[in-house]
Image (cartoon, grey):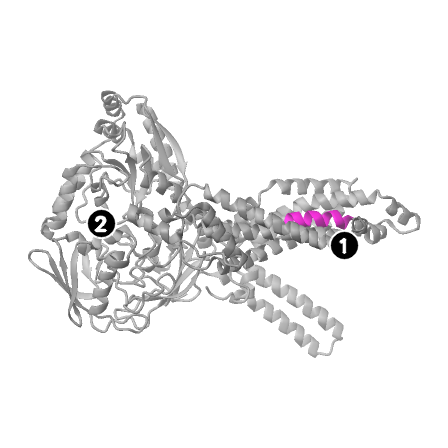
Amino acid sequence: MRVYLRKAASLLVSAVIASFVVFAFLSVLPGDPAEVVLGTNAGEAELAALRHDFGTDRPLVVQYADWAQGLLHGDFGTSYISHDAVGPRIADRFGVTCWLALGGMLVAVLFALPAGVLAAAWHRRPAGALLSALSQAGIAVPAFLAGILLVYVFAVRAGALPAGGYTPLAEDPAAWARQLVLPCLSLGLVQGAVLTRYVRSAVLTVLHQDFLRTARAKGRRRRAALWRHGLPNAAVPVLTVLGLQLSTVLVGAVVVERVFVIPGLGDLLLQSVADRDLLVVQGVVIVLVVAVLVVNVVTDLLYHLLDPRLRSR
Amino acid sequence: MAKSTAGSGPASGAASGASSRAASGAALRRTARATGCALLAGTLAAACGSGSGSSGSGTADSLAIGLIAEPASLDFTTTDGAAVPQATLGSIYEGLVRVDQQGKIQPLLAERYERSDDGRTYTFHLRKGVKFTSGAEFTADDAVFSIERVKKDWKLKTARQMDVVAKAEKTGDHTVKVTLNHASNGWLYAMTTRIGAMFSRTGVADLASHPVGTGPFKLAERRRGDRIVLDRNGSYWGSKPELGKVTLKYFKDAGAMNNALLTKGIDVVGTVQAPESLSRFSDRNRFRTIEGSSTGEVVLSMNNSREPFKDKRVRQAVRHAIDHKALVETSRAGHGKLIGTMATPTDPWYEDLTGSYPYDPGKAKQLLKDAGAEGRTVKFRVPNMPYAMSAAQVVKSQLDQVGLKAEIEPLEFPARWLSEVYNKADYDLSVIAHTEPRDLWTFADPGYYFRYGNPAYAKLLKDADSGRPEDEAARYREAARLLSDDAAADWLYLMPNLMVADKDVTGLPVNQVGEGLDLANVRWAKKK
């Protein structure tokens, strides 16, 4: 129980520090939302009036306090540009990004588990070396490049899948699934390549452990011993990496959303930075930070549950 | 967007096959497994089914157009930018008058109008039976309300074009008299732009998301970050548009937009961002390219208030130093018309002034030497947009050849460019497309970022505006010539109105003349 409390407290402190850092960084970002809204139609009087409406003419401390106080009540403020509530807009986009991240992770796991285990099991054979080399190559490919290649092959050349776009699940599940295939693949394959290496090394480590030798000595076949005793033990470090990867996938989705025209959080973030729609930017970054923190805490807790040696400490 | 019919077909087919096998009395477990396989096969089929399922329109009277800049709000009374009127003017909103493809002013919601001899009064006779999409009738009260509202409520500087109006009054249920402080030809033209849009007195509560207008289309759906869907306005007063539904689909990335057209995700690329990508659409059996005139002058601005460009000879040197033809060839794959001044072929006063400063590096060198500006280094602050960056590279290398060192500094657009170049005028050279129609006046304002303050020019514009309409074109022509002679800036080229469409789409506007995207005549030649 104490572990949980400690984790919750550290999460809270991290979130508060993050909110401060986010605000501080954005406040030194050059550019003024009022100038963007008025564009080439800006006059001094119009600018001053708009800055006053936005409240960006107030001292930074007051602006931060105002924003932080709103956050505590779940109020993310109102967008400078579109005049609507920031919170619901982020929630809407976050859902889209979550599908993308989960799909990407699914692809990564489906790819990496068999590939990693085989690479380890065959580590003395040419096939194992080939798998390792492939995963090494996969790590070197950025997700957006994978995306562009996938679009070219499957959408433009073969015409089998849409090149981009997003239809909500509730509206048309088939279109939703079709549109998510390529972006999830491009996110997932790269992450899968990374994960393969971890799975391989985790399984390799386990292969040389005493308990596996004991199992073999008691008459279990190599494959059975690996399944029964090896893989559960290898799962612990893999799970940690998986947690870390979920965070990278959430952030990596930012770029993939551009390539595939998916209206997710990343797309919202980039657009809002360009527009200097600061409350939206702050909101998105805080949500991403908290999501990453939560993922890390959950991973930590799972780690504790899976590895009894950690629990006793 | 169309539902994916092609995708769901095989899925249901396979599933019904499985259930018939179940009816034949096979073991329960086998049925379950078969159903599972069928479902999996169906999902895969759905996922990899034919690309036509995601077609941009799918039906004969709907069309999807790809565009780049998404409007952040649909309210152009509070938010600047070309994207809002592009999506709404002419489609959702209409004015009393409009500008046609030849650049002439034509009546629209006003059946006809009269101008008094002194040019100070306009009487508009409004069409009867025009209704807003809210159901309210369009009357003289709405027209007066709309005109006054610009003066009262608009937060943008464009609204100042309405300052010339002394009063707008209703003289009958369908007649409006507008009295100006002084005669102004420009005012009537401005009435064809966004400031002339007619609003309903009861429909301005939430313009950002619920626009109410009299146009041929009405807003059906707006999915932020993705699309705006317009439906045909069933009670439109004029001839009904051919299309029942138009989807404006917004892309952040030109490559993604091209892919969408290639995979039938959209039917039209509304603005080609990278002309070098046109080769991807060379298949005449599938695509058609439309290239017309636009109102976007790509201006190489020189800060007229700062050394070395304070000196006219240096500005002239720049104009002689640039090989415009080569520039368009290199940076725009040859797509772009050379203009030579701040006017476009759809302006009634346009004349080709590209000959006044022919490419002549020798003369440029001499002029720089005379001005003592040889070997000088200037700050070339460029917005980080592809067309501007690629033009800047060419300009830089050509200026290098005549002995002017331009140091390119990319500025993030819009935020930093607006703040540094536009508002503070902290730059020597810059490049940007000025997309507003008939924007000669920008050079008449000494506070504008060109910092060009020639009183003779401002006077010519004033005379053109307040004189008789028949003299307007001649005076503007004179002004445009003066601007060119003065080398107030250099005009690199005119952005073409460049579109690529499915070959069966017809009626797309060849020239982009006003601020709105003209959809009235767009239709499918063949029923799909």
| Boundaries of the magenta span | A234-246
Identify which residue is drawn at 32% across, 63% down: B92
Callout 2 and callout 1 share a chain: no
Compared with B247, B280 (above or below) is above
The residue to which callout 2 is attached is B346
The residue to which callout 1 is attached is A305
Left or right? Give the position of B7 relative to B384.
right
Residue B459 rendering spot, x and y as whole percentages: 13, 42
Q: Is residue A40 visible?
A: yes
- 2 and 1 marks in contact (CB < 8 Å): no
Give the dominant element type of the magenta stretch: helix, strand or loop.
helix
Left or right? Give the position of B415 relative to A195.
left
Q: Is disc 1 placed on a helix, strand or loop?
A: helix
Q: Residue furthest left?
A: B117
Residue B321 rendering spot, x and y as whole percentages: 28, 28
Q: Which residue type carries mark 1?
A: Leu
Residue A235 rendering spot, x and y as whole percentages: 76, 50
Left or right? Give the position of B131 relative to B122.
right
A241 falls in the magenta region: yes
Residue A15 rendering spot, x and y as whole percentages: 59, 50
Compared with A140, B126 (above or below) is below
